[in-house]
Amino acid sequence: MTDLWIHPSLILLVGAVILPMLPKALRKPFLVAVPVLAFADVLSMQGNFGVHGVTRFLDWTLTFGRVDALSMVFAYIMTLMCVIGTIYGLHVEEPAQHSAAWTYVAGSLGVIFCGDYLVLFLFWEIMAFSSVFLVWFRGRKESLASGYRYLLVHTAGGLLLLAGLVLRYQATGGDISFGPIGVASPQLYTWLILAGFILNAAVPPLHAWLPDAYGEATVTGSVFMCAFTTKTAVYALARGFAGMEILVPLGVCMALYGVVYAVLENDSRRLLAYHIISQVGYMVAGVGIGTELAINGACAHAFAHILYKGLLFMGCGAVLHMTGKSKFTELGGLYKRMPRTFVYTLIGGLSISAFPLFSGFVSKAMIVAAGFEVHNYWAAFLLTLASAGTFLHTGLKVPYFIWFGKNNCSEETWKRASDPPMNMQVGMILASILCIFIGCYTPYLYKMLPFPQVAQAYEPYTAYHLSETLQILLFTALGFFLLLKKLTPEPKISLDLDWFYRMGGRAFYWFARKPVQTADDAVSEAWDRQGVVPLMKTARYWSWFDWHAIDGVVDGIARTVREYGEALRTFQSGRLQLNIIAMLALVALALALLAAA
């Protein structure tokens, strides 16, 4: 690496500023060039680790570029996903949507490469405030409300993080470096920083913002959002909280919780959003286990998850883009109208279900193996159970009720359905190829992991692992078709923990409008009667006194002086000699009178 180090976030931010000013004819080449340049920038850093972008600000040393094995694996997949997502969204004519997406990715990369908490917090907030526009750009009333809730929740998380950073700064005597935080003896600031991180990771009960926002985002916006916020949080946890035991039960809870709500969900994109919670649960549990194999597994699963979850969101987004529908009860039988999109979505479903020869198979099992390695059997068994639920809803429910099953499409929806524009298909093709390539050629991914020797020593394609996985998948498929009528989606809403802040917000709004506003009106009226009226009377009295007393005396003196001046002016003839003689005569008269006295 040369002495010149260029932050990939800088490339994306500059591109986001320039894009709206370009002529329309140049936008699409520019849209492809900017993320490709950012990806090439990351590729140039491989094997050349070090610290870059160090600058002084006030009394602090800020580090914008810490390049090591952990940051590189996340930066690699995030810039690659930025390329795929941008290609998928080339049909979007509004440049502001692309600028918001690139700013969002830049915020994520800023966190990935940061070396201190101040830089982390700066890019952490850039992520939150730029990604909300990907929800608002959909333009629906529901999107506007979801975006505001998303912003409020992430602002609260940012404040928790900031409070933890301030307390840590005081406790450590001014240390702002971002690294292992000392999980063996956690302090108050440790829990506050952890709370800020796990909110972005969507750990229950701080998770409801995710399906709420991702299900309402734009078609291309949801592809970006599913890849960056939660995985950036996983990186932050791996960097600062590896081995923190509380993360193991939290991760297992996530894995099961997301599966349950995904099975109940009727909207395809909300189902995928709930399953993000489940899949990120594996990563959080891996960070909590904290061994080299577990950290490798968390990073590998984040890498694979970004691709296959992005592919699934692209597939379901293509259905929404072409038909205007995303609910299972309004779809069905679309394999006849959208055969290519069906194939791409099926590849994503097989990848996320950890089917052999697909990416999830070589990443998810690494975390489970790490659990057995440290004798954390309950966590390993429950994570294996969650794998069955993953295949049930994402590997079977999504493909069946969109592409097969009963045709619930209206005549208009059926006519509109067809494979999406070629740019959207290219994005899905790239993600599909990578999902298969990673599953078939493990060194591609394993060499990039933080502990490559440990990763390369791990062999996913063992007879035991293959037989175990195939048994789980086959019995899950059998159960799905036996219980098909019970699993048929229904047009209903499943209440989640967001009910509390939704209803709490309404209660606060009512409290502010009714009791508080009524009390404020009563105080205002009492003030008008008891305070303003006497005050006005007092003001009128002092106005009268000022006019007649003070101004009268001052103006009377002024009038008297003016009258004497007028009288004296009559003695002035305007001739200087006569005035001097008259003055001398008056002085002589005065002296004569004094002498006579």
Image (cartoon, rainbow, N blue to C red):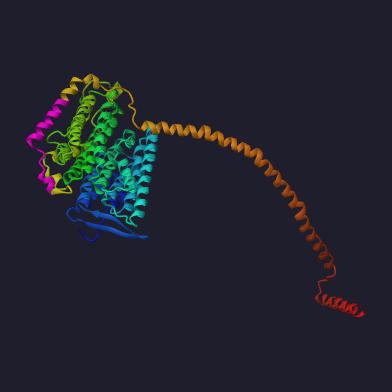
Decide if residue 24 is in sight here.
no
Q: Residue at x 11, y 39 (%)?
A: 460
Decide if residue 183 is in sight here.
yes
**Residue 492 vs residue 532: left or right?**
left
Q: Of 336 and 438, which appears nearest the observer?
A: 438
Magenta segment boundaries in residue numbering: 453-476
Residue 60 in percent (x, y) is at 34, 59
Direction front: furthest residue: 185
Q: Residue at x 18, y 56 (%)?
A: 48
**Residue 469 vs residue 273: left or right?**
left
Residue 442 in percent (x, y) is at 12, 42
Residue 284 in percent (x, y) is at 24, 41
State yes or no: residue 471 in magenta: yes
Residue 254 in percent (x, y) is at 26, 35
Q: Of 138 and 444, which appears nearest the observer?
A: 444
Instruction: Identify the main secondary structure in magenta.
Output: helix
Q: Of 338 and 198, which appears nearest the observer?
A: 198
